[in-house]
């Protein structure tokens, strides 16, 4: 008996055993995809992780359906890394596999319905809906479930299908379909019989009356002579200004032949520049220091102020690996950043750069996956957001994690809830490669590790080209409102500085970390505020679409003209978002071009590129945006940055609020004055004497670090304690309350460490589900592995209690 152990793409914590024949046993390798039956009739794509001859005890092993690959498409290091993520982040291996693979490689069976050939059907006995399905099956041999939904124009068609199966009219089949399709480009060439001189004369004679067709043939010769390479149909249509129908006629006549060539979806046609990258003296010093640190340590932190030229150091570091034929992974926190960086790296390295993130479609992702797997020239450097971590690297030399402090490196939902920075360090360990972390405002944990000599630390104190750090000026909003020096949300100082910058032809960035027009609409008569019916939050008003939206579940309603509670028409907006700032700017500076960069304006695949390019080409004078603007973007002409209200970030109910505010404000401020001229930053706040805001003005990272570390030690937070957050969700408030209490009591009895909760979060209902959280704080001296095993056992016993089975439980390890 021969068996294969597989991982299924389902939230199941263990692997499953399937039976294979002897030939299959010798053919299958670890990391190949197999189609396997699971449950009554479903077929899933599983990954083979082990071959053995041990018969499973608890169940009868089924046979596999088919082998989908000739070669493994997942490396064994990847599989080890997946198992590490599953154990460390306390999720199932199936969830990691599902999150790691491009979904085009995860084939799922689609249910296909066919008519039962042998039975005789009495059409009079059928109901109207059954008759429609039966008629549709007379027209075509098989239908998918989606087709039946379309035929009957209703969502729930399963009861009808089941009835028809019982009556022996239909049969169900499971089919598996490959969803990746290579991109084929249609080319055209002249039929061989017309290639000679005589053939050509005959051809022109044949077409003397068809002017349009003769024109195309002449155009074809012109293109052939000038390009000297195969001609795509699209190009011929464009240059001859004809329709594809005319070309089809020529193909039908046998004058032209068409053929197809497979092509990559993401192409880069530019050349790499031959200029050698020269580092400045301070950059070279830092680069040598990094190399020195790597001789003793695996991870090094580059702490360089904004605009100190960290990217050039990264490029220099990448060059070293390319010489050795190694691959490099470059992780960024935001897709917005990849667009600008890819441009810079491609200028330097040409087509060796591949990009991988969620704005790419399925087919493009599969192509990058294949290139990395085959160690192809085109993917020696991979730039991407956190998901690029899961690519099948063969020869990984180094990993760069830029802006490592960013919270977007942490995946929140769905599981696996991994932190890309920490998972990348473990991946590098598997590959025996090095990790370079870079940031102007490192996270406390990383800086703590660097200070305690676990990581190397290299500091870069001055800006590139001896540029000066921007001047930071604080504006007291309370005082300005009192003296009536405000126009909308703009103080006189800010308006003056904006006019000044615009008159010199410089650009301005304004930062407000909230999208929409205003977060609250309030009735002035009775105080009613429109709430989302499914979540416990007020609806945000979006003026451009004239609607109220919930930013948690996406619920939308039109803007009310009168109050729903008392029918008064006296409605007012409270608070402000990016849309409101943009509209106020247009009334203050009517002739100025404004742009807005937030989740609403960057929805499309090229949303970021369009806005960033037009700002870089100075088509936009003032750019208003949310935290997307705060990270690593490089604009030479920006001399002024305005932070509209610094207080919204400071008073967040989160133990990292001050650290995050410091990072965010310093990063936004760093977008200013990146060329020769010194930049300026204006921070509007109601509390100019606040410690964190004062630290931003002085650019005092050390001061912020020491102050926060002191607090963290007293209140038992990272880096002194590890945190695990358990979230419980259910639609029934009382059942959730009872279940959360049960879980908390068992945990506090079993664990000898602080267990806090069960607590209602600030937003305690999302999508009609009530939420409770329990927080476990693990001290440094307690073994983290065995603690997690204890927690997992408690969660398993919680699931075994019948009345709590419906409660959804999510575990988030290191959720900060």
Image (cartoon, rainbow, N blue to C red):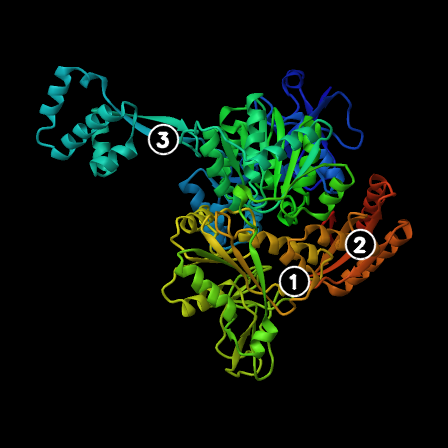
| Crowding near the residue tagged with mark 1, few <14, some 14–19, many ≥20 C-alpha atoms within 10 Å | some
How far is disc 1 from disc 3 in space, using C-alphas? 48 Å
Q: Nearer the viewer, mark 1 or mark 3?
A: 3
Residue 46 in which image quadrant: top right
Mark 3 packing: few (<14 Cα in 10 Å), some, or many (20+)?
some
Among the two numbered marks 2 and 3 on one chain, the one whose residue lies closer to the N terminus: 3
How far apart, in angstroms, are the residues tagged by discs 2 and 3? 62 Å
Disc 2 to disc 1, C-alpha distance: 40 Å
Rendered residue at 53%/51% (across/down): 671
Q: Is residue 787 left or right of residue 475?
A: right
User: Residue 185 — which label?
Assistant: 3
Q: Is residue 789 visible?
A: yes
The residue at which mark 1 appears reads as 768
Mark 2, mark 1: which one is toward the viewer?
Answer: 2
The residue indicated by pointer 2 is 710
Image quarter (top left, top right, bottom left or bottom right) of the N terminus: top right
Identify the element where label 2 is drawn: helix
Image coordinates of residue 130 in percent, x first then y, are 49, 50
């Amino acid at each position: 008996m021969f068996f294969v152990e597989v991982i299924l793409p389902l939230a199941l914590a263990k692997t499953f055993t399937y039976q294979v024949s002897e030939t299959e046993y010798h053919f299958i390798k670890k990391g190949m995809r197999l189609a396997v039956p699971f449950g009554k009739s479903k077929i899933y794509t599983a990954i083979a992780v082990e071959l053995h001859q041990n018969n499973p005890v608890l169940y009868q092993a089924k046979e596999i359906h088919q082998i989908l690959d000739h070669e493994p498409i997942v490396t064994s290091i990847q599989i080890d890394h997946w198992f590490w993520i599953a154990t460390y982040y306390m999720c199932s291996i199936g969830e990691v596999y599902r999150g790691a693979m491009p979904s085009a490689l995860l084939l799922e069976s689609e249910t296909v319905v066919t008519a039962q050939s042998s039975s005789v059907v009495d059409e009079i006995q059928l109901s109207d809906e059954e008759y429609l399905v039966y008629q549709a099956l007379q027209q075509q041999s098989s239908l998918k479930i989606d087709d039946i939904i379309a035929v009957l124009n209703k969502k729930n068609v399963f009861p009808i299908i089941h009835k028809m199966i019982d009556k022996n009219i239909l049969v169900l089949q499971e089919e598996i379909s490959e969803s990746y399709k290579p991109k084929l480009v249609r080319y055209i060439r002249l039929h061989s019989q017309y290639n000679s001189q005589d053939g050509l004369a005959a051809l022109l004679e044949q077409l003397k009356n068809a002017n349009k067709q003769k024109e195309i043939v002449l155009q074809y010769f012109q293109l052939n002579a000038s390009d000297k390479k195969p001609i795509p149909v699209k190009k011929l249509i464009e240059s001859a200004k004809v329709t594809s129908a005319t070309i089809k006629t020529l193909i039908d006549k046998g004058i032209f032949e068409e053929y197809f060539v497979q092509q990559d979806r993401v192409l880069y046609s530019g050349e790499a520049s031959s200029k050698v990258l020269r580092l400045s003296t301070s950059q070279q010093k830092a680069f040598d220091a990094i190399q020195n640190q790597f001789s003793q340590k695996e991870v090094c932190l580059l702490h360089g102020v904004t605009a100190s030229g960290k990217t050039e150091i990264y490029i220099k570091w990448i060059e070293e690996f390319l010489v050795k034929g190694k691959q490099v992974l470059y992780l960024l926190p935001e897709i917005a950043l990849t667009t600008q960086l890819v441009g810079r790296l491609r200028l330097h390295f040409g087509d060796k750069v591949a990009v991988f993130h969620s704005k790419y479609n399925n087919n493009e992702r599969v192509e990058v996956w294949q290139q990395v797997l085959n160690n192809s020239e085109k993917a020696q450097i991979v730039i991407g957001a956190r998901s690029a971590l899961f690519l099948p690297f063969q020869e990984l030399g180094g990993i760069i994690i830029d802006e490592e402090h960013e919270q977007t490196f942490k995946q929140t939902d769905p599981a696996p809830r991994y932190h890309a920075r920490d998972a990348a360090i473990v991946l590098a360990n598997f590959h025996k490669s090095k990790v370079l972390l870079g940031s102007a405002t490192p996270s406390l944990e990383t800086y703590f590790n660097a200070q305690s000599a676990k990581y190397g630390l290299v500091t870069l104190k001055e800006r590139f080209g001896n540029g000066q750090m921007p001047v930071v000026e604080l504006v007291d909003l309370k005082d300005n409102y009192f003296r009536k020096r405000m126009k909308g949300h703009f103080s006189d100082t800010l308006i003056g500085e904006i006019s000044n910058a615009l008159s010199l032809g410089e650009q301005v960035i304004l930062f407000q970390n909230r999208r929409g027009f205003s977060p609250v609409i309030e009735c002035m008569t009775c105080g009613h505020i429109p709430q989302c019916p499914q979540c416990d939050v007020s609806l945000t008003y979006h003026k451009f679409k004239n609607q109220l939206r919930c930013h948690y579940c996406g619920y939308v309603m039109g803007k009310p003209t009168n109050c729903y509670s008392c029918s008064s028409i006296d409605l007012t907006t409270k608070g402000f978002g990016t849309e409101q700032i943009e509209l106020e700017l247009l009334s203050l500076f009517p002739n100025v071009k404004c742009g807005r960069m937030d989740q609403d304006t960057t929805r499309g695949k090229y949303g970021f590129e369009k806005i960033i390019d037009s700002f870089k080409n100075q088509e936009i004078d003032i750019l208003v945006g949310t935290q997307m603007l705060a990270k690593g973007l490089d604009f030479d002409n920006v001399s002024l940055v305005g932070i509209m209200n610094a207080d919204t970030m400071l008073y967040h109910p989160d133990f990292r609020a001050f650290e995050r505010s410091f990072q965010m404000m310093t990063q936004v401020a760093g977008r200013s004055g990146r060329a020769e001229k010194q930049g300026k930053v204006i921070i509007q706040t109601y509390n100019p004497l606040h410690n964190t805001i004062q630290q931003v003005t002085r650019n005092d990272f050390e001061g912020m670090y020491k102050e926060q570390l002191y607090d963290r030690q007293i209140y038992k937070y990272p880096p002194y304690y590890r945190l695990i957050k358990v979230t419980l969700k259910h639609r029934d408030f009382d059942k959730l309350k009872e279940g959360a209490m049960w879980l908390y009591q068992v945990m506090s009895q079993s664990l000898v460490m602080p267990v806090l909760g069960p607590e209602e979060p600030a937003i305690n209902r999302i999508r009609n589900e009530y939420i409770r959280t329990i927080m476990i704080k693990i001290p440094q001296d307690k073994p983290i592995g065995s603690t997690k095993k204890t927690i997992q056992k408690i969660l398993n016993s919680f699931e075994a209690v019948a009345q709590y089975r419906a409660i959804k439980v999510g575990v988030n390890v290191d959720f900060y």
